[in-house]
Image (cartoon, rainbow, N blue to C red):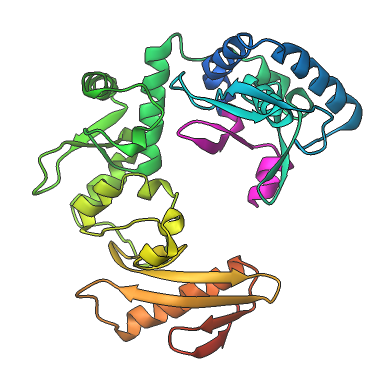
Amino acid sequence: MLQELLYKDRKLVDYADKELSIWPTEDWPYFSSYRDRSKELGRSFDGLEELKAKAIAYIEENGPVCSDKIPIEGEIFWHSSMHWSGNWHKKSQAARSTLEQLYTDGELIIHHKNGSRKYYDIAAKYLPVSVLTAQNPCRNEDEFNEWRVYRRIGAVGLLWDKNSPAFLGINLNAEKRKRVLSKLENEGKIYPVTVEGIKNLFYFLSEDTELMQKITDGQADLKPRMSFIAPLDPLLWDKALIHTLWDFQYSWEIYTPAAKRKYGYYTLPILYGERFVGRIEAVPDRKKGILSVRGLWLEPGIRQTKRLNSALDKTIMNFGKFNDCEFVDMMYNKSSKKATNV
């Protein structure tokens, strides 16, 4: 579904925001300042404009291309426009740098990916003219920051008035953050809420008021369900927030040396109902069709009830299906189960 939305229907695009992100194509006009800055930075590098023209001509004639296939040789000392601090440079393969520059300029988009390899094509061939030519709804950088803060709160669901990784990439210090939050609150776009025992004020989108009211009144009919949460899910953007609200300490150990890992290379938090109950390391082998559950760690005080184990079995089976795995190998207890339709 994600591949179709990105590369067939073009309802989503890969582009920068918090970092390299995926967001709705309809948001393209909001990021015109990104593209304008990218073009401005690109013009400061001698010879880059000629390389860009050469790349565009080649793609127009030959179609989607990756950096290994485009006939641009050598290396250049290049400023990556994806890094908005304005002071980050690198020596890079000229072909890759040229394609990335055109990509951040908005001239190219990612046509598709083969693993992590990106193939680029002309943006105008795939994005609607109405999107490409639309005026930026934000009149200035302050309005752009307000829109981004609003969108980040919606992505996480509940954010606090505090320096947070959830605001990564937005030009915010404490004073600006408070000013933006206050303005959004005065406009009725977000509402404040307090959490017992925590001094920081939290905010949620006003459109979620009905749900918030039901939850605080204890009237929400929410059936407990279990999910394995991806490490880059918006819910996990601010790990200090997660630790404060749920007393759940999570670290994505993919960049931790193997000898220093406490759990595993790609261990996922387990959310069950309104609690983080543990974490699981489940590694898919799509060629063999086997999902290997290498480890399962429950949080202190979590009892392995029949209900929890049933939810865990169901979620593991679904996770196997999601990863195109017909069988599940429970390595941590040496049992094996087949993924069935549930």
> Which residue appears at 52% of the width and 15% of the height?
33
Taking the view exactly as shown, the residue that stands out farthest to the bottom is 335
Q: 252 or 48, which is in the foreground?
A: 48
Taking the view exactly as shown, the residue that stands out farthest to the right is 61
> Which residue appears at 28% of the width and 57% of the height?
220
As drawn, 256 above or below 141: below
**Left or right of 266, for residue 43:** right
Q: 104 or 97, which is in the foreground?
A: 97
As drawn, 337 above or below 231: below
**Left or right of 327, for residue 194:** left
Residue 322's x, y, as percent?
59, 66
Q: Is residue 15 magenta?
A: yes
> Which residue appears at 50% of the width and 15% of the height?
137
Q: Quadrant of residue 66?
A: top right
Residue 342, visible in the rendered structure: no
Residue 217's x, y, as percent?
18, 52
Q: Is residue 45 magenta?
A: no
Residue 228's x, y, as percent?
43, 64
Residue 238, visible in the rendered structure: yes
Q: Quadrant of residue 121?
A: top right
> Which residue appears at 61% of the width and 24% of the height?
104
Give the position of the C terminus as an image quadrant. bottom right
Residue 283's x, y, as percent?
54, 70
Q: 1 or 86, which is in the foreground?
A: 86
**Left or right of 163, for residue 332:** right
Looking at the rendering, the stretch of residues picked out in magenta corresponds to 1-26
